[in-house]
Amino acid sequence: RVFLHLFAGRRRRGDIQFYLDHMSPSHNYVLHVVSVDIVIDKVWGDATAEQTRAYWLGLAHQGFIVGFIAGPPCETWSRARGKTVKGLQSDRCAPRIIRTEDHLWGLPSLALKELMQIATGNELLTFTLLLACMMIQTGGIGIVEHPAEPLEENAAAIWKLPIVRALLAAPGVTRRRLAQGLFGAPSPKPTDLLVINLPDLALELRKWMTRSELPKGKAIGLDQKGQWRTGVLKEYPPAFCGALASAIRKGIDSYEVIEQDPPS
């Protein structure tokens, strides 16, 4: 069985594949965890390449992909956009807002650099949602992770997209909110999950929490090195990865094993 972790980032101790690879092997199937990211493999990890997307979607359609997790890039959706931040030399504005509730796929008038960011973000999000559709059709499991829906009026969020709302109405699909700060992240980082066929996820999340109160740190602005503070939050805390991996493994173990020819 093949499980995909899209946009996994660098391989590291304590990531989702680390936990899944170190669990006791199943007695009736072999689990192959594939961390997909351009920093891992420039060809098969590049989800902006049409052949790469077609390859993984084709395998999912044939039933060879038992599940996936994806946190599509959120730079163009970030609540930090448009804020005035304190720099090392002087105050400056963060990148401007390029999505709103009325223009969830991107504002109609953008600079060329912003247009490229929107196009790439939309492409990767669409790939993620197509895989989610495949998992719903084939009875697989899935998790889509993204920043929690903001409270600000007219703010953009993937959770307002009609396709995401349609997926949330499908059988076996739920939405769960959590704070990654309760799992070791340096700031609260409120997060929403679209969860497909994983009834044990809530219990595993509760088991793996490392603190009962949210941290006070903020992820807006620049650090002492002049880097955006949001950068460190791109990697999930190890405890969060452990919770996700435990629920994923339980979900995969629950499926009946059916003999099939191996994929070509």
Image (tube, grey):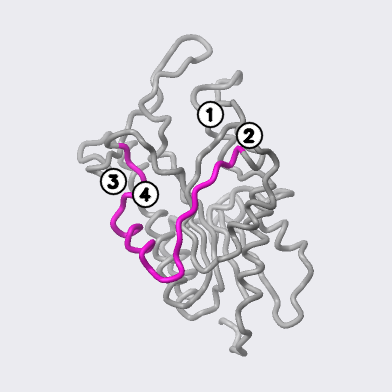
Using the image as rendered, state which of residue 73 and residue 133 is in the foreground.
133
C-alpha gap between disc 3 and disc 4: 8 Å
Q: Earlier in the sequence, mark 1 or mark 3?
A: 3
Categorize mark 2 by other alpha carbons within 10 Å: few (<14), some (14-19), many (20+). Answer: few
Q: Earlier in the sequence, mark 2 or mark 3?
A: 3
The answer to whether residue 80 is above or below residue 192 is: above
Badge 3 density bin: few <14, some 14–19, many ≥20, Cα 10 Å: some
Span of residues in magenta: 155-181
- Mark-to-mark CA distance, 2 and 4: 27 Å
User: Farthest residue toward the top?
Assistant: 89
User: Would you say residue 156 sits in the magenta stretch?
Assistant: yes
> Magenta stretch: residue 242 in it?
no
- Determine crowd level at label 4: few under 14, some 14-19, many 20+ residues with C-alpha closer than 10 A: some
Q: Which residue is mark 2?
A: 213
Real-space Cα separation, disc 1 to disc 3, in angstroms? 23 Å
Q: Is residue 164 found left or right of 201 in the rendered image?
A: left
Residue toward you, 44 or 70: 70
Task: Give the quarter of the figure containing the C terminus.
Answer: bottom right
* x 56%, y 66%: residue: 199
- Foreground of the two, 144 or 21: 144
Contact, mark 3 vs mark 4 (Cβ under 8 Å): yes
First in sequence, mark 2 or 1: give its number: 2
Type of residue at label 2? Answer: Glu
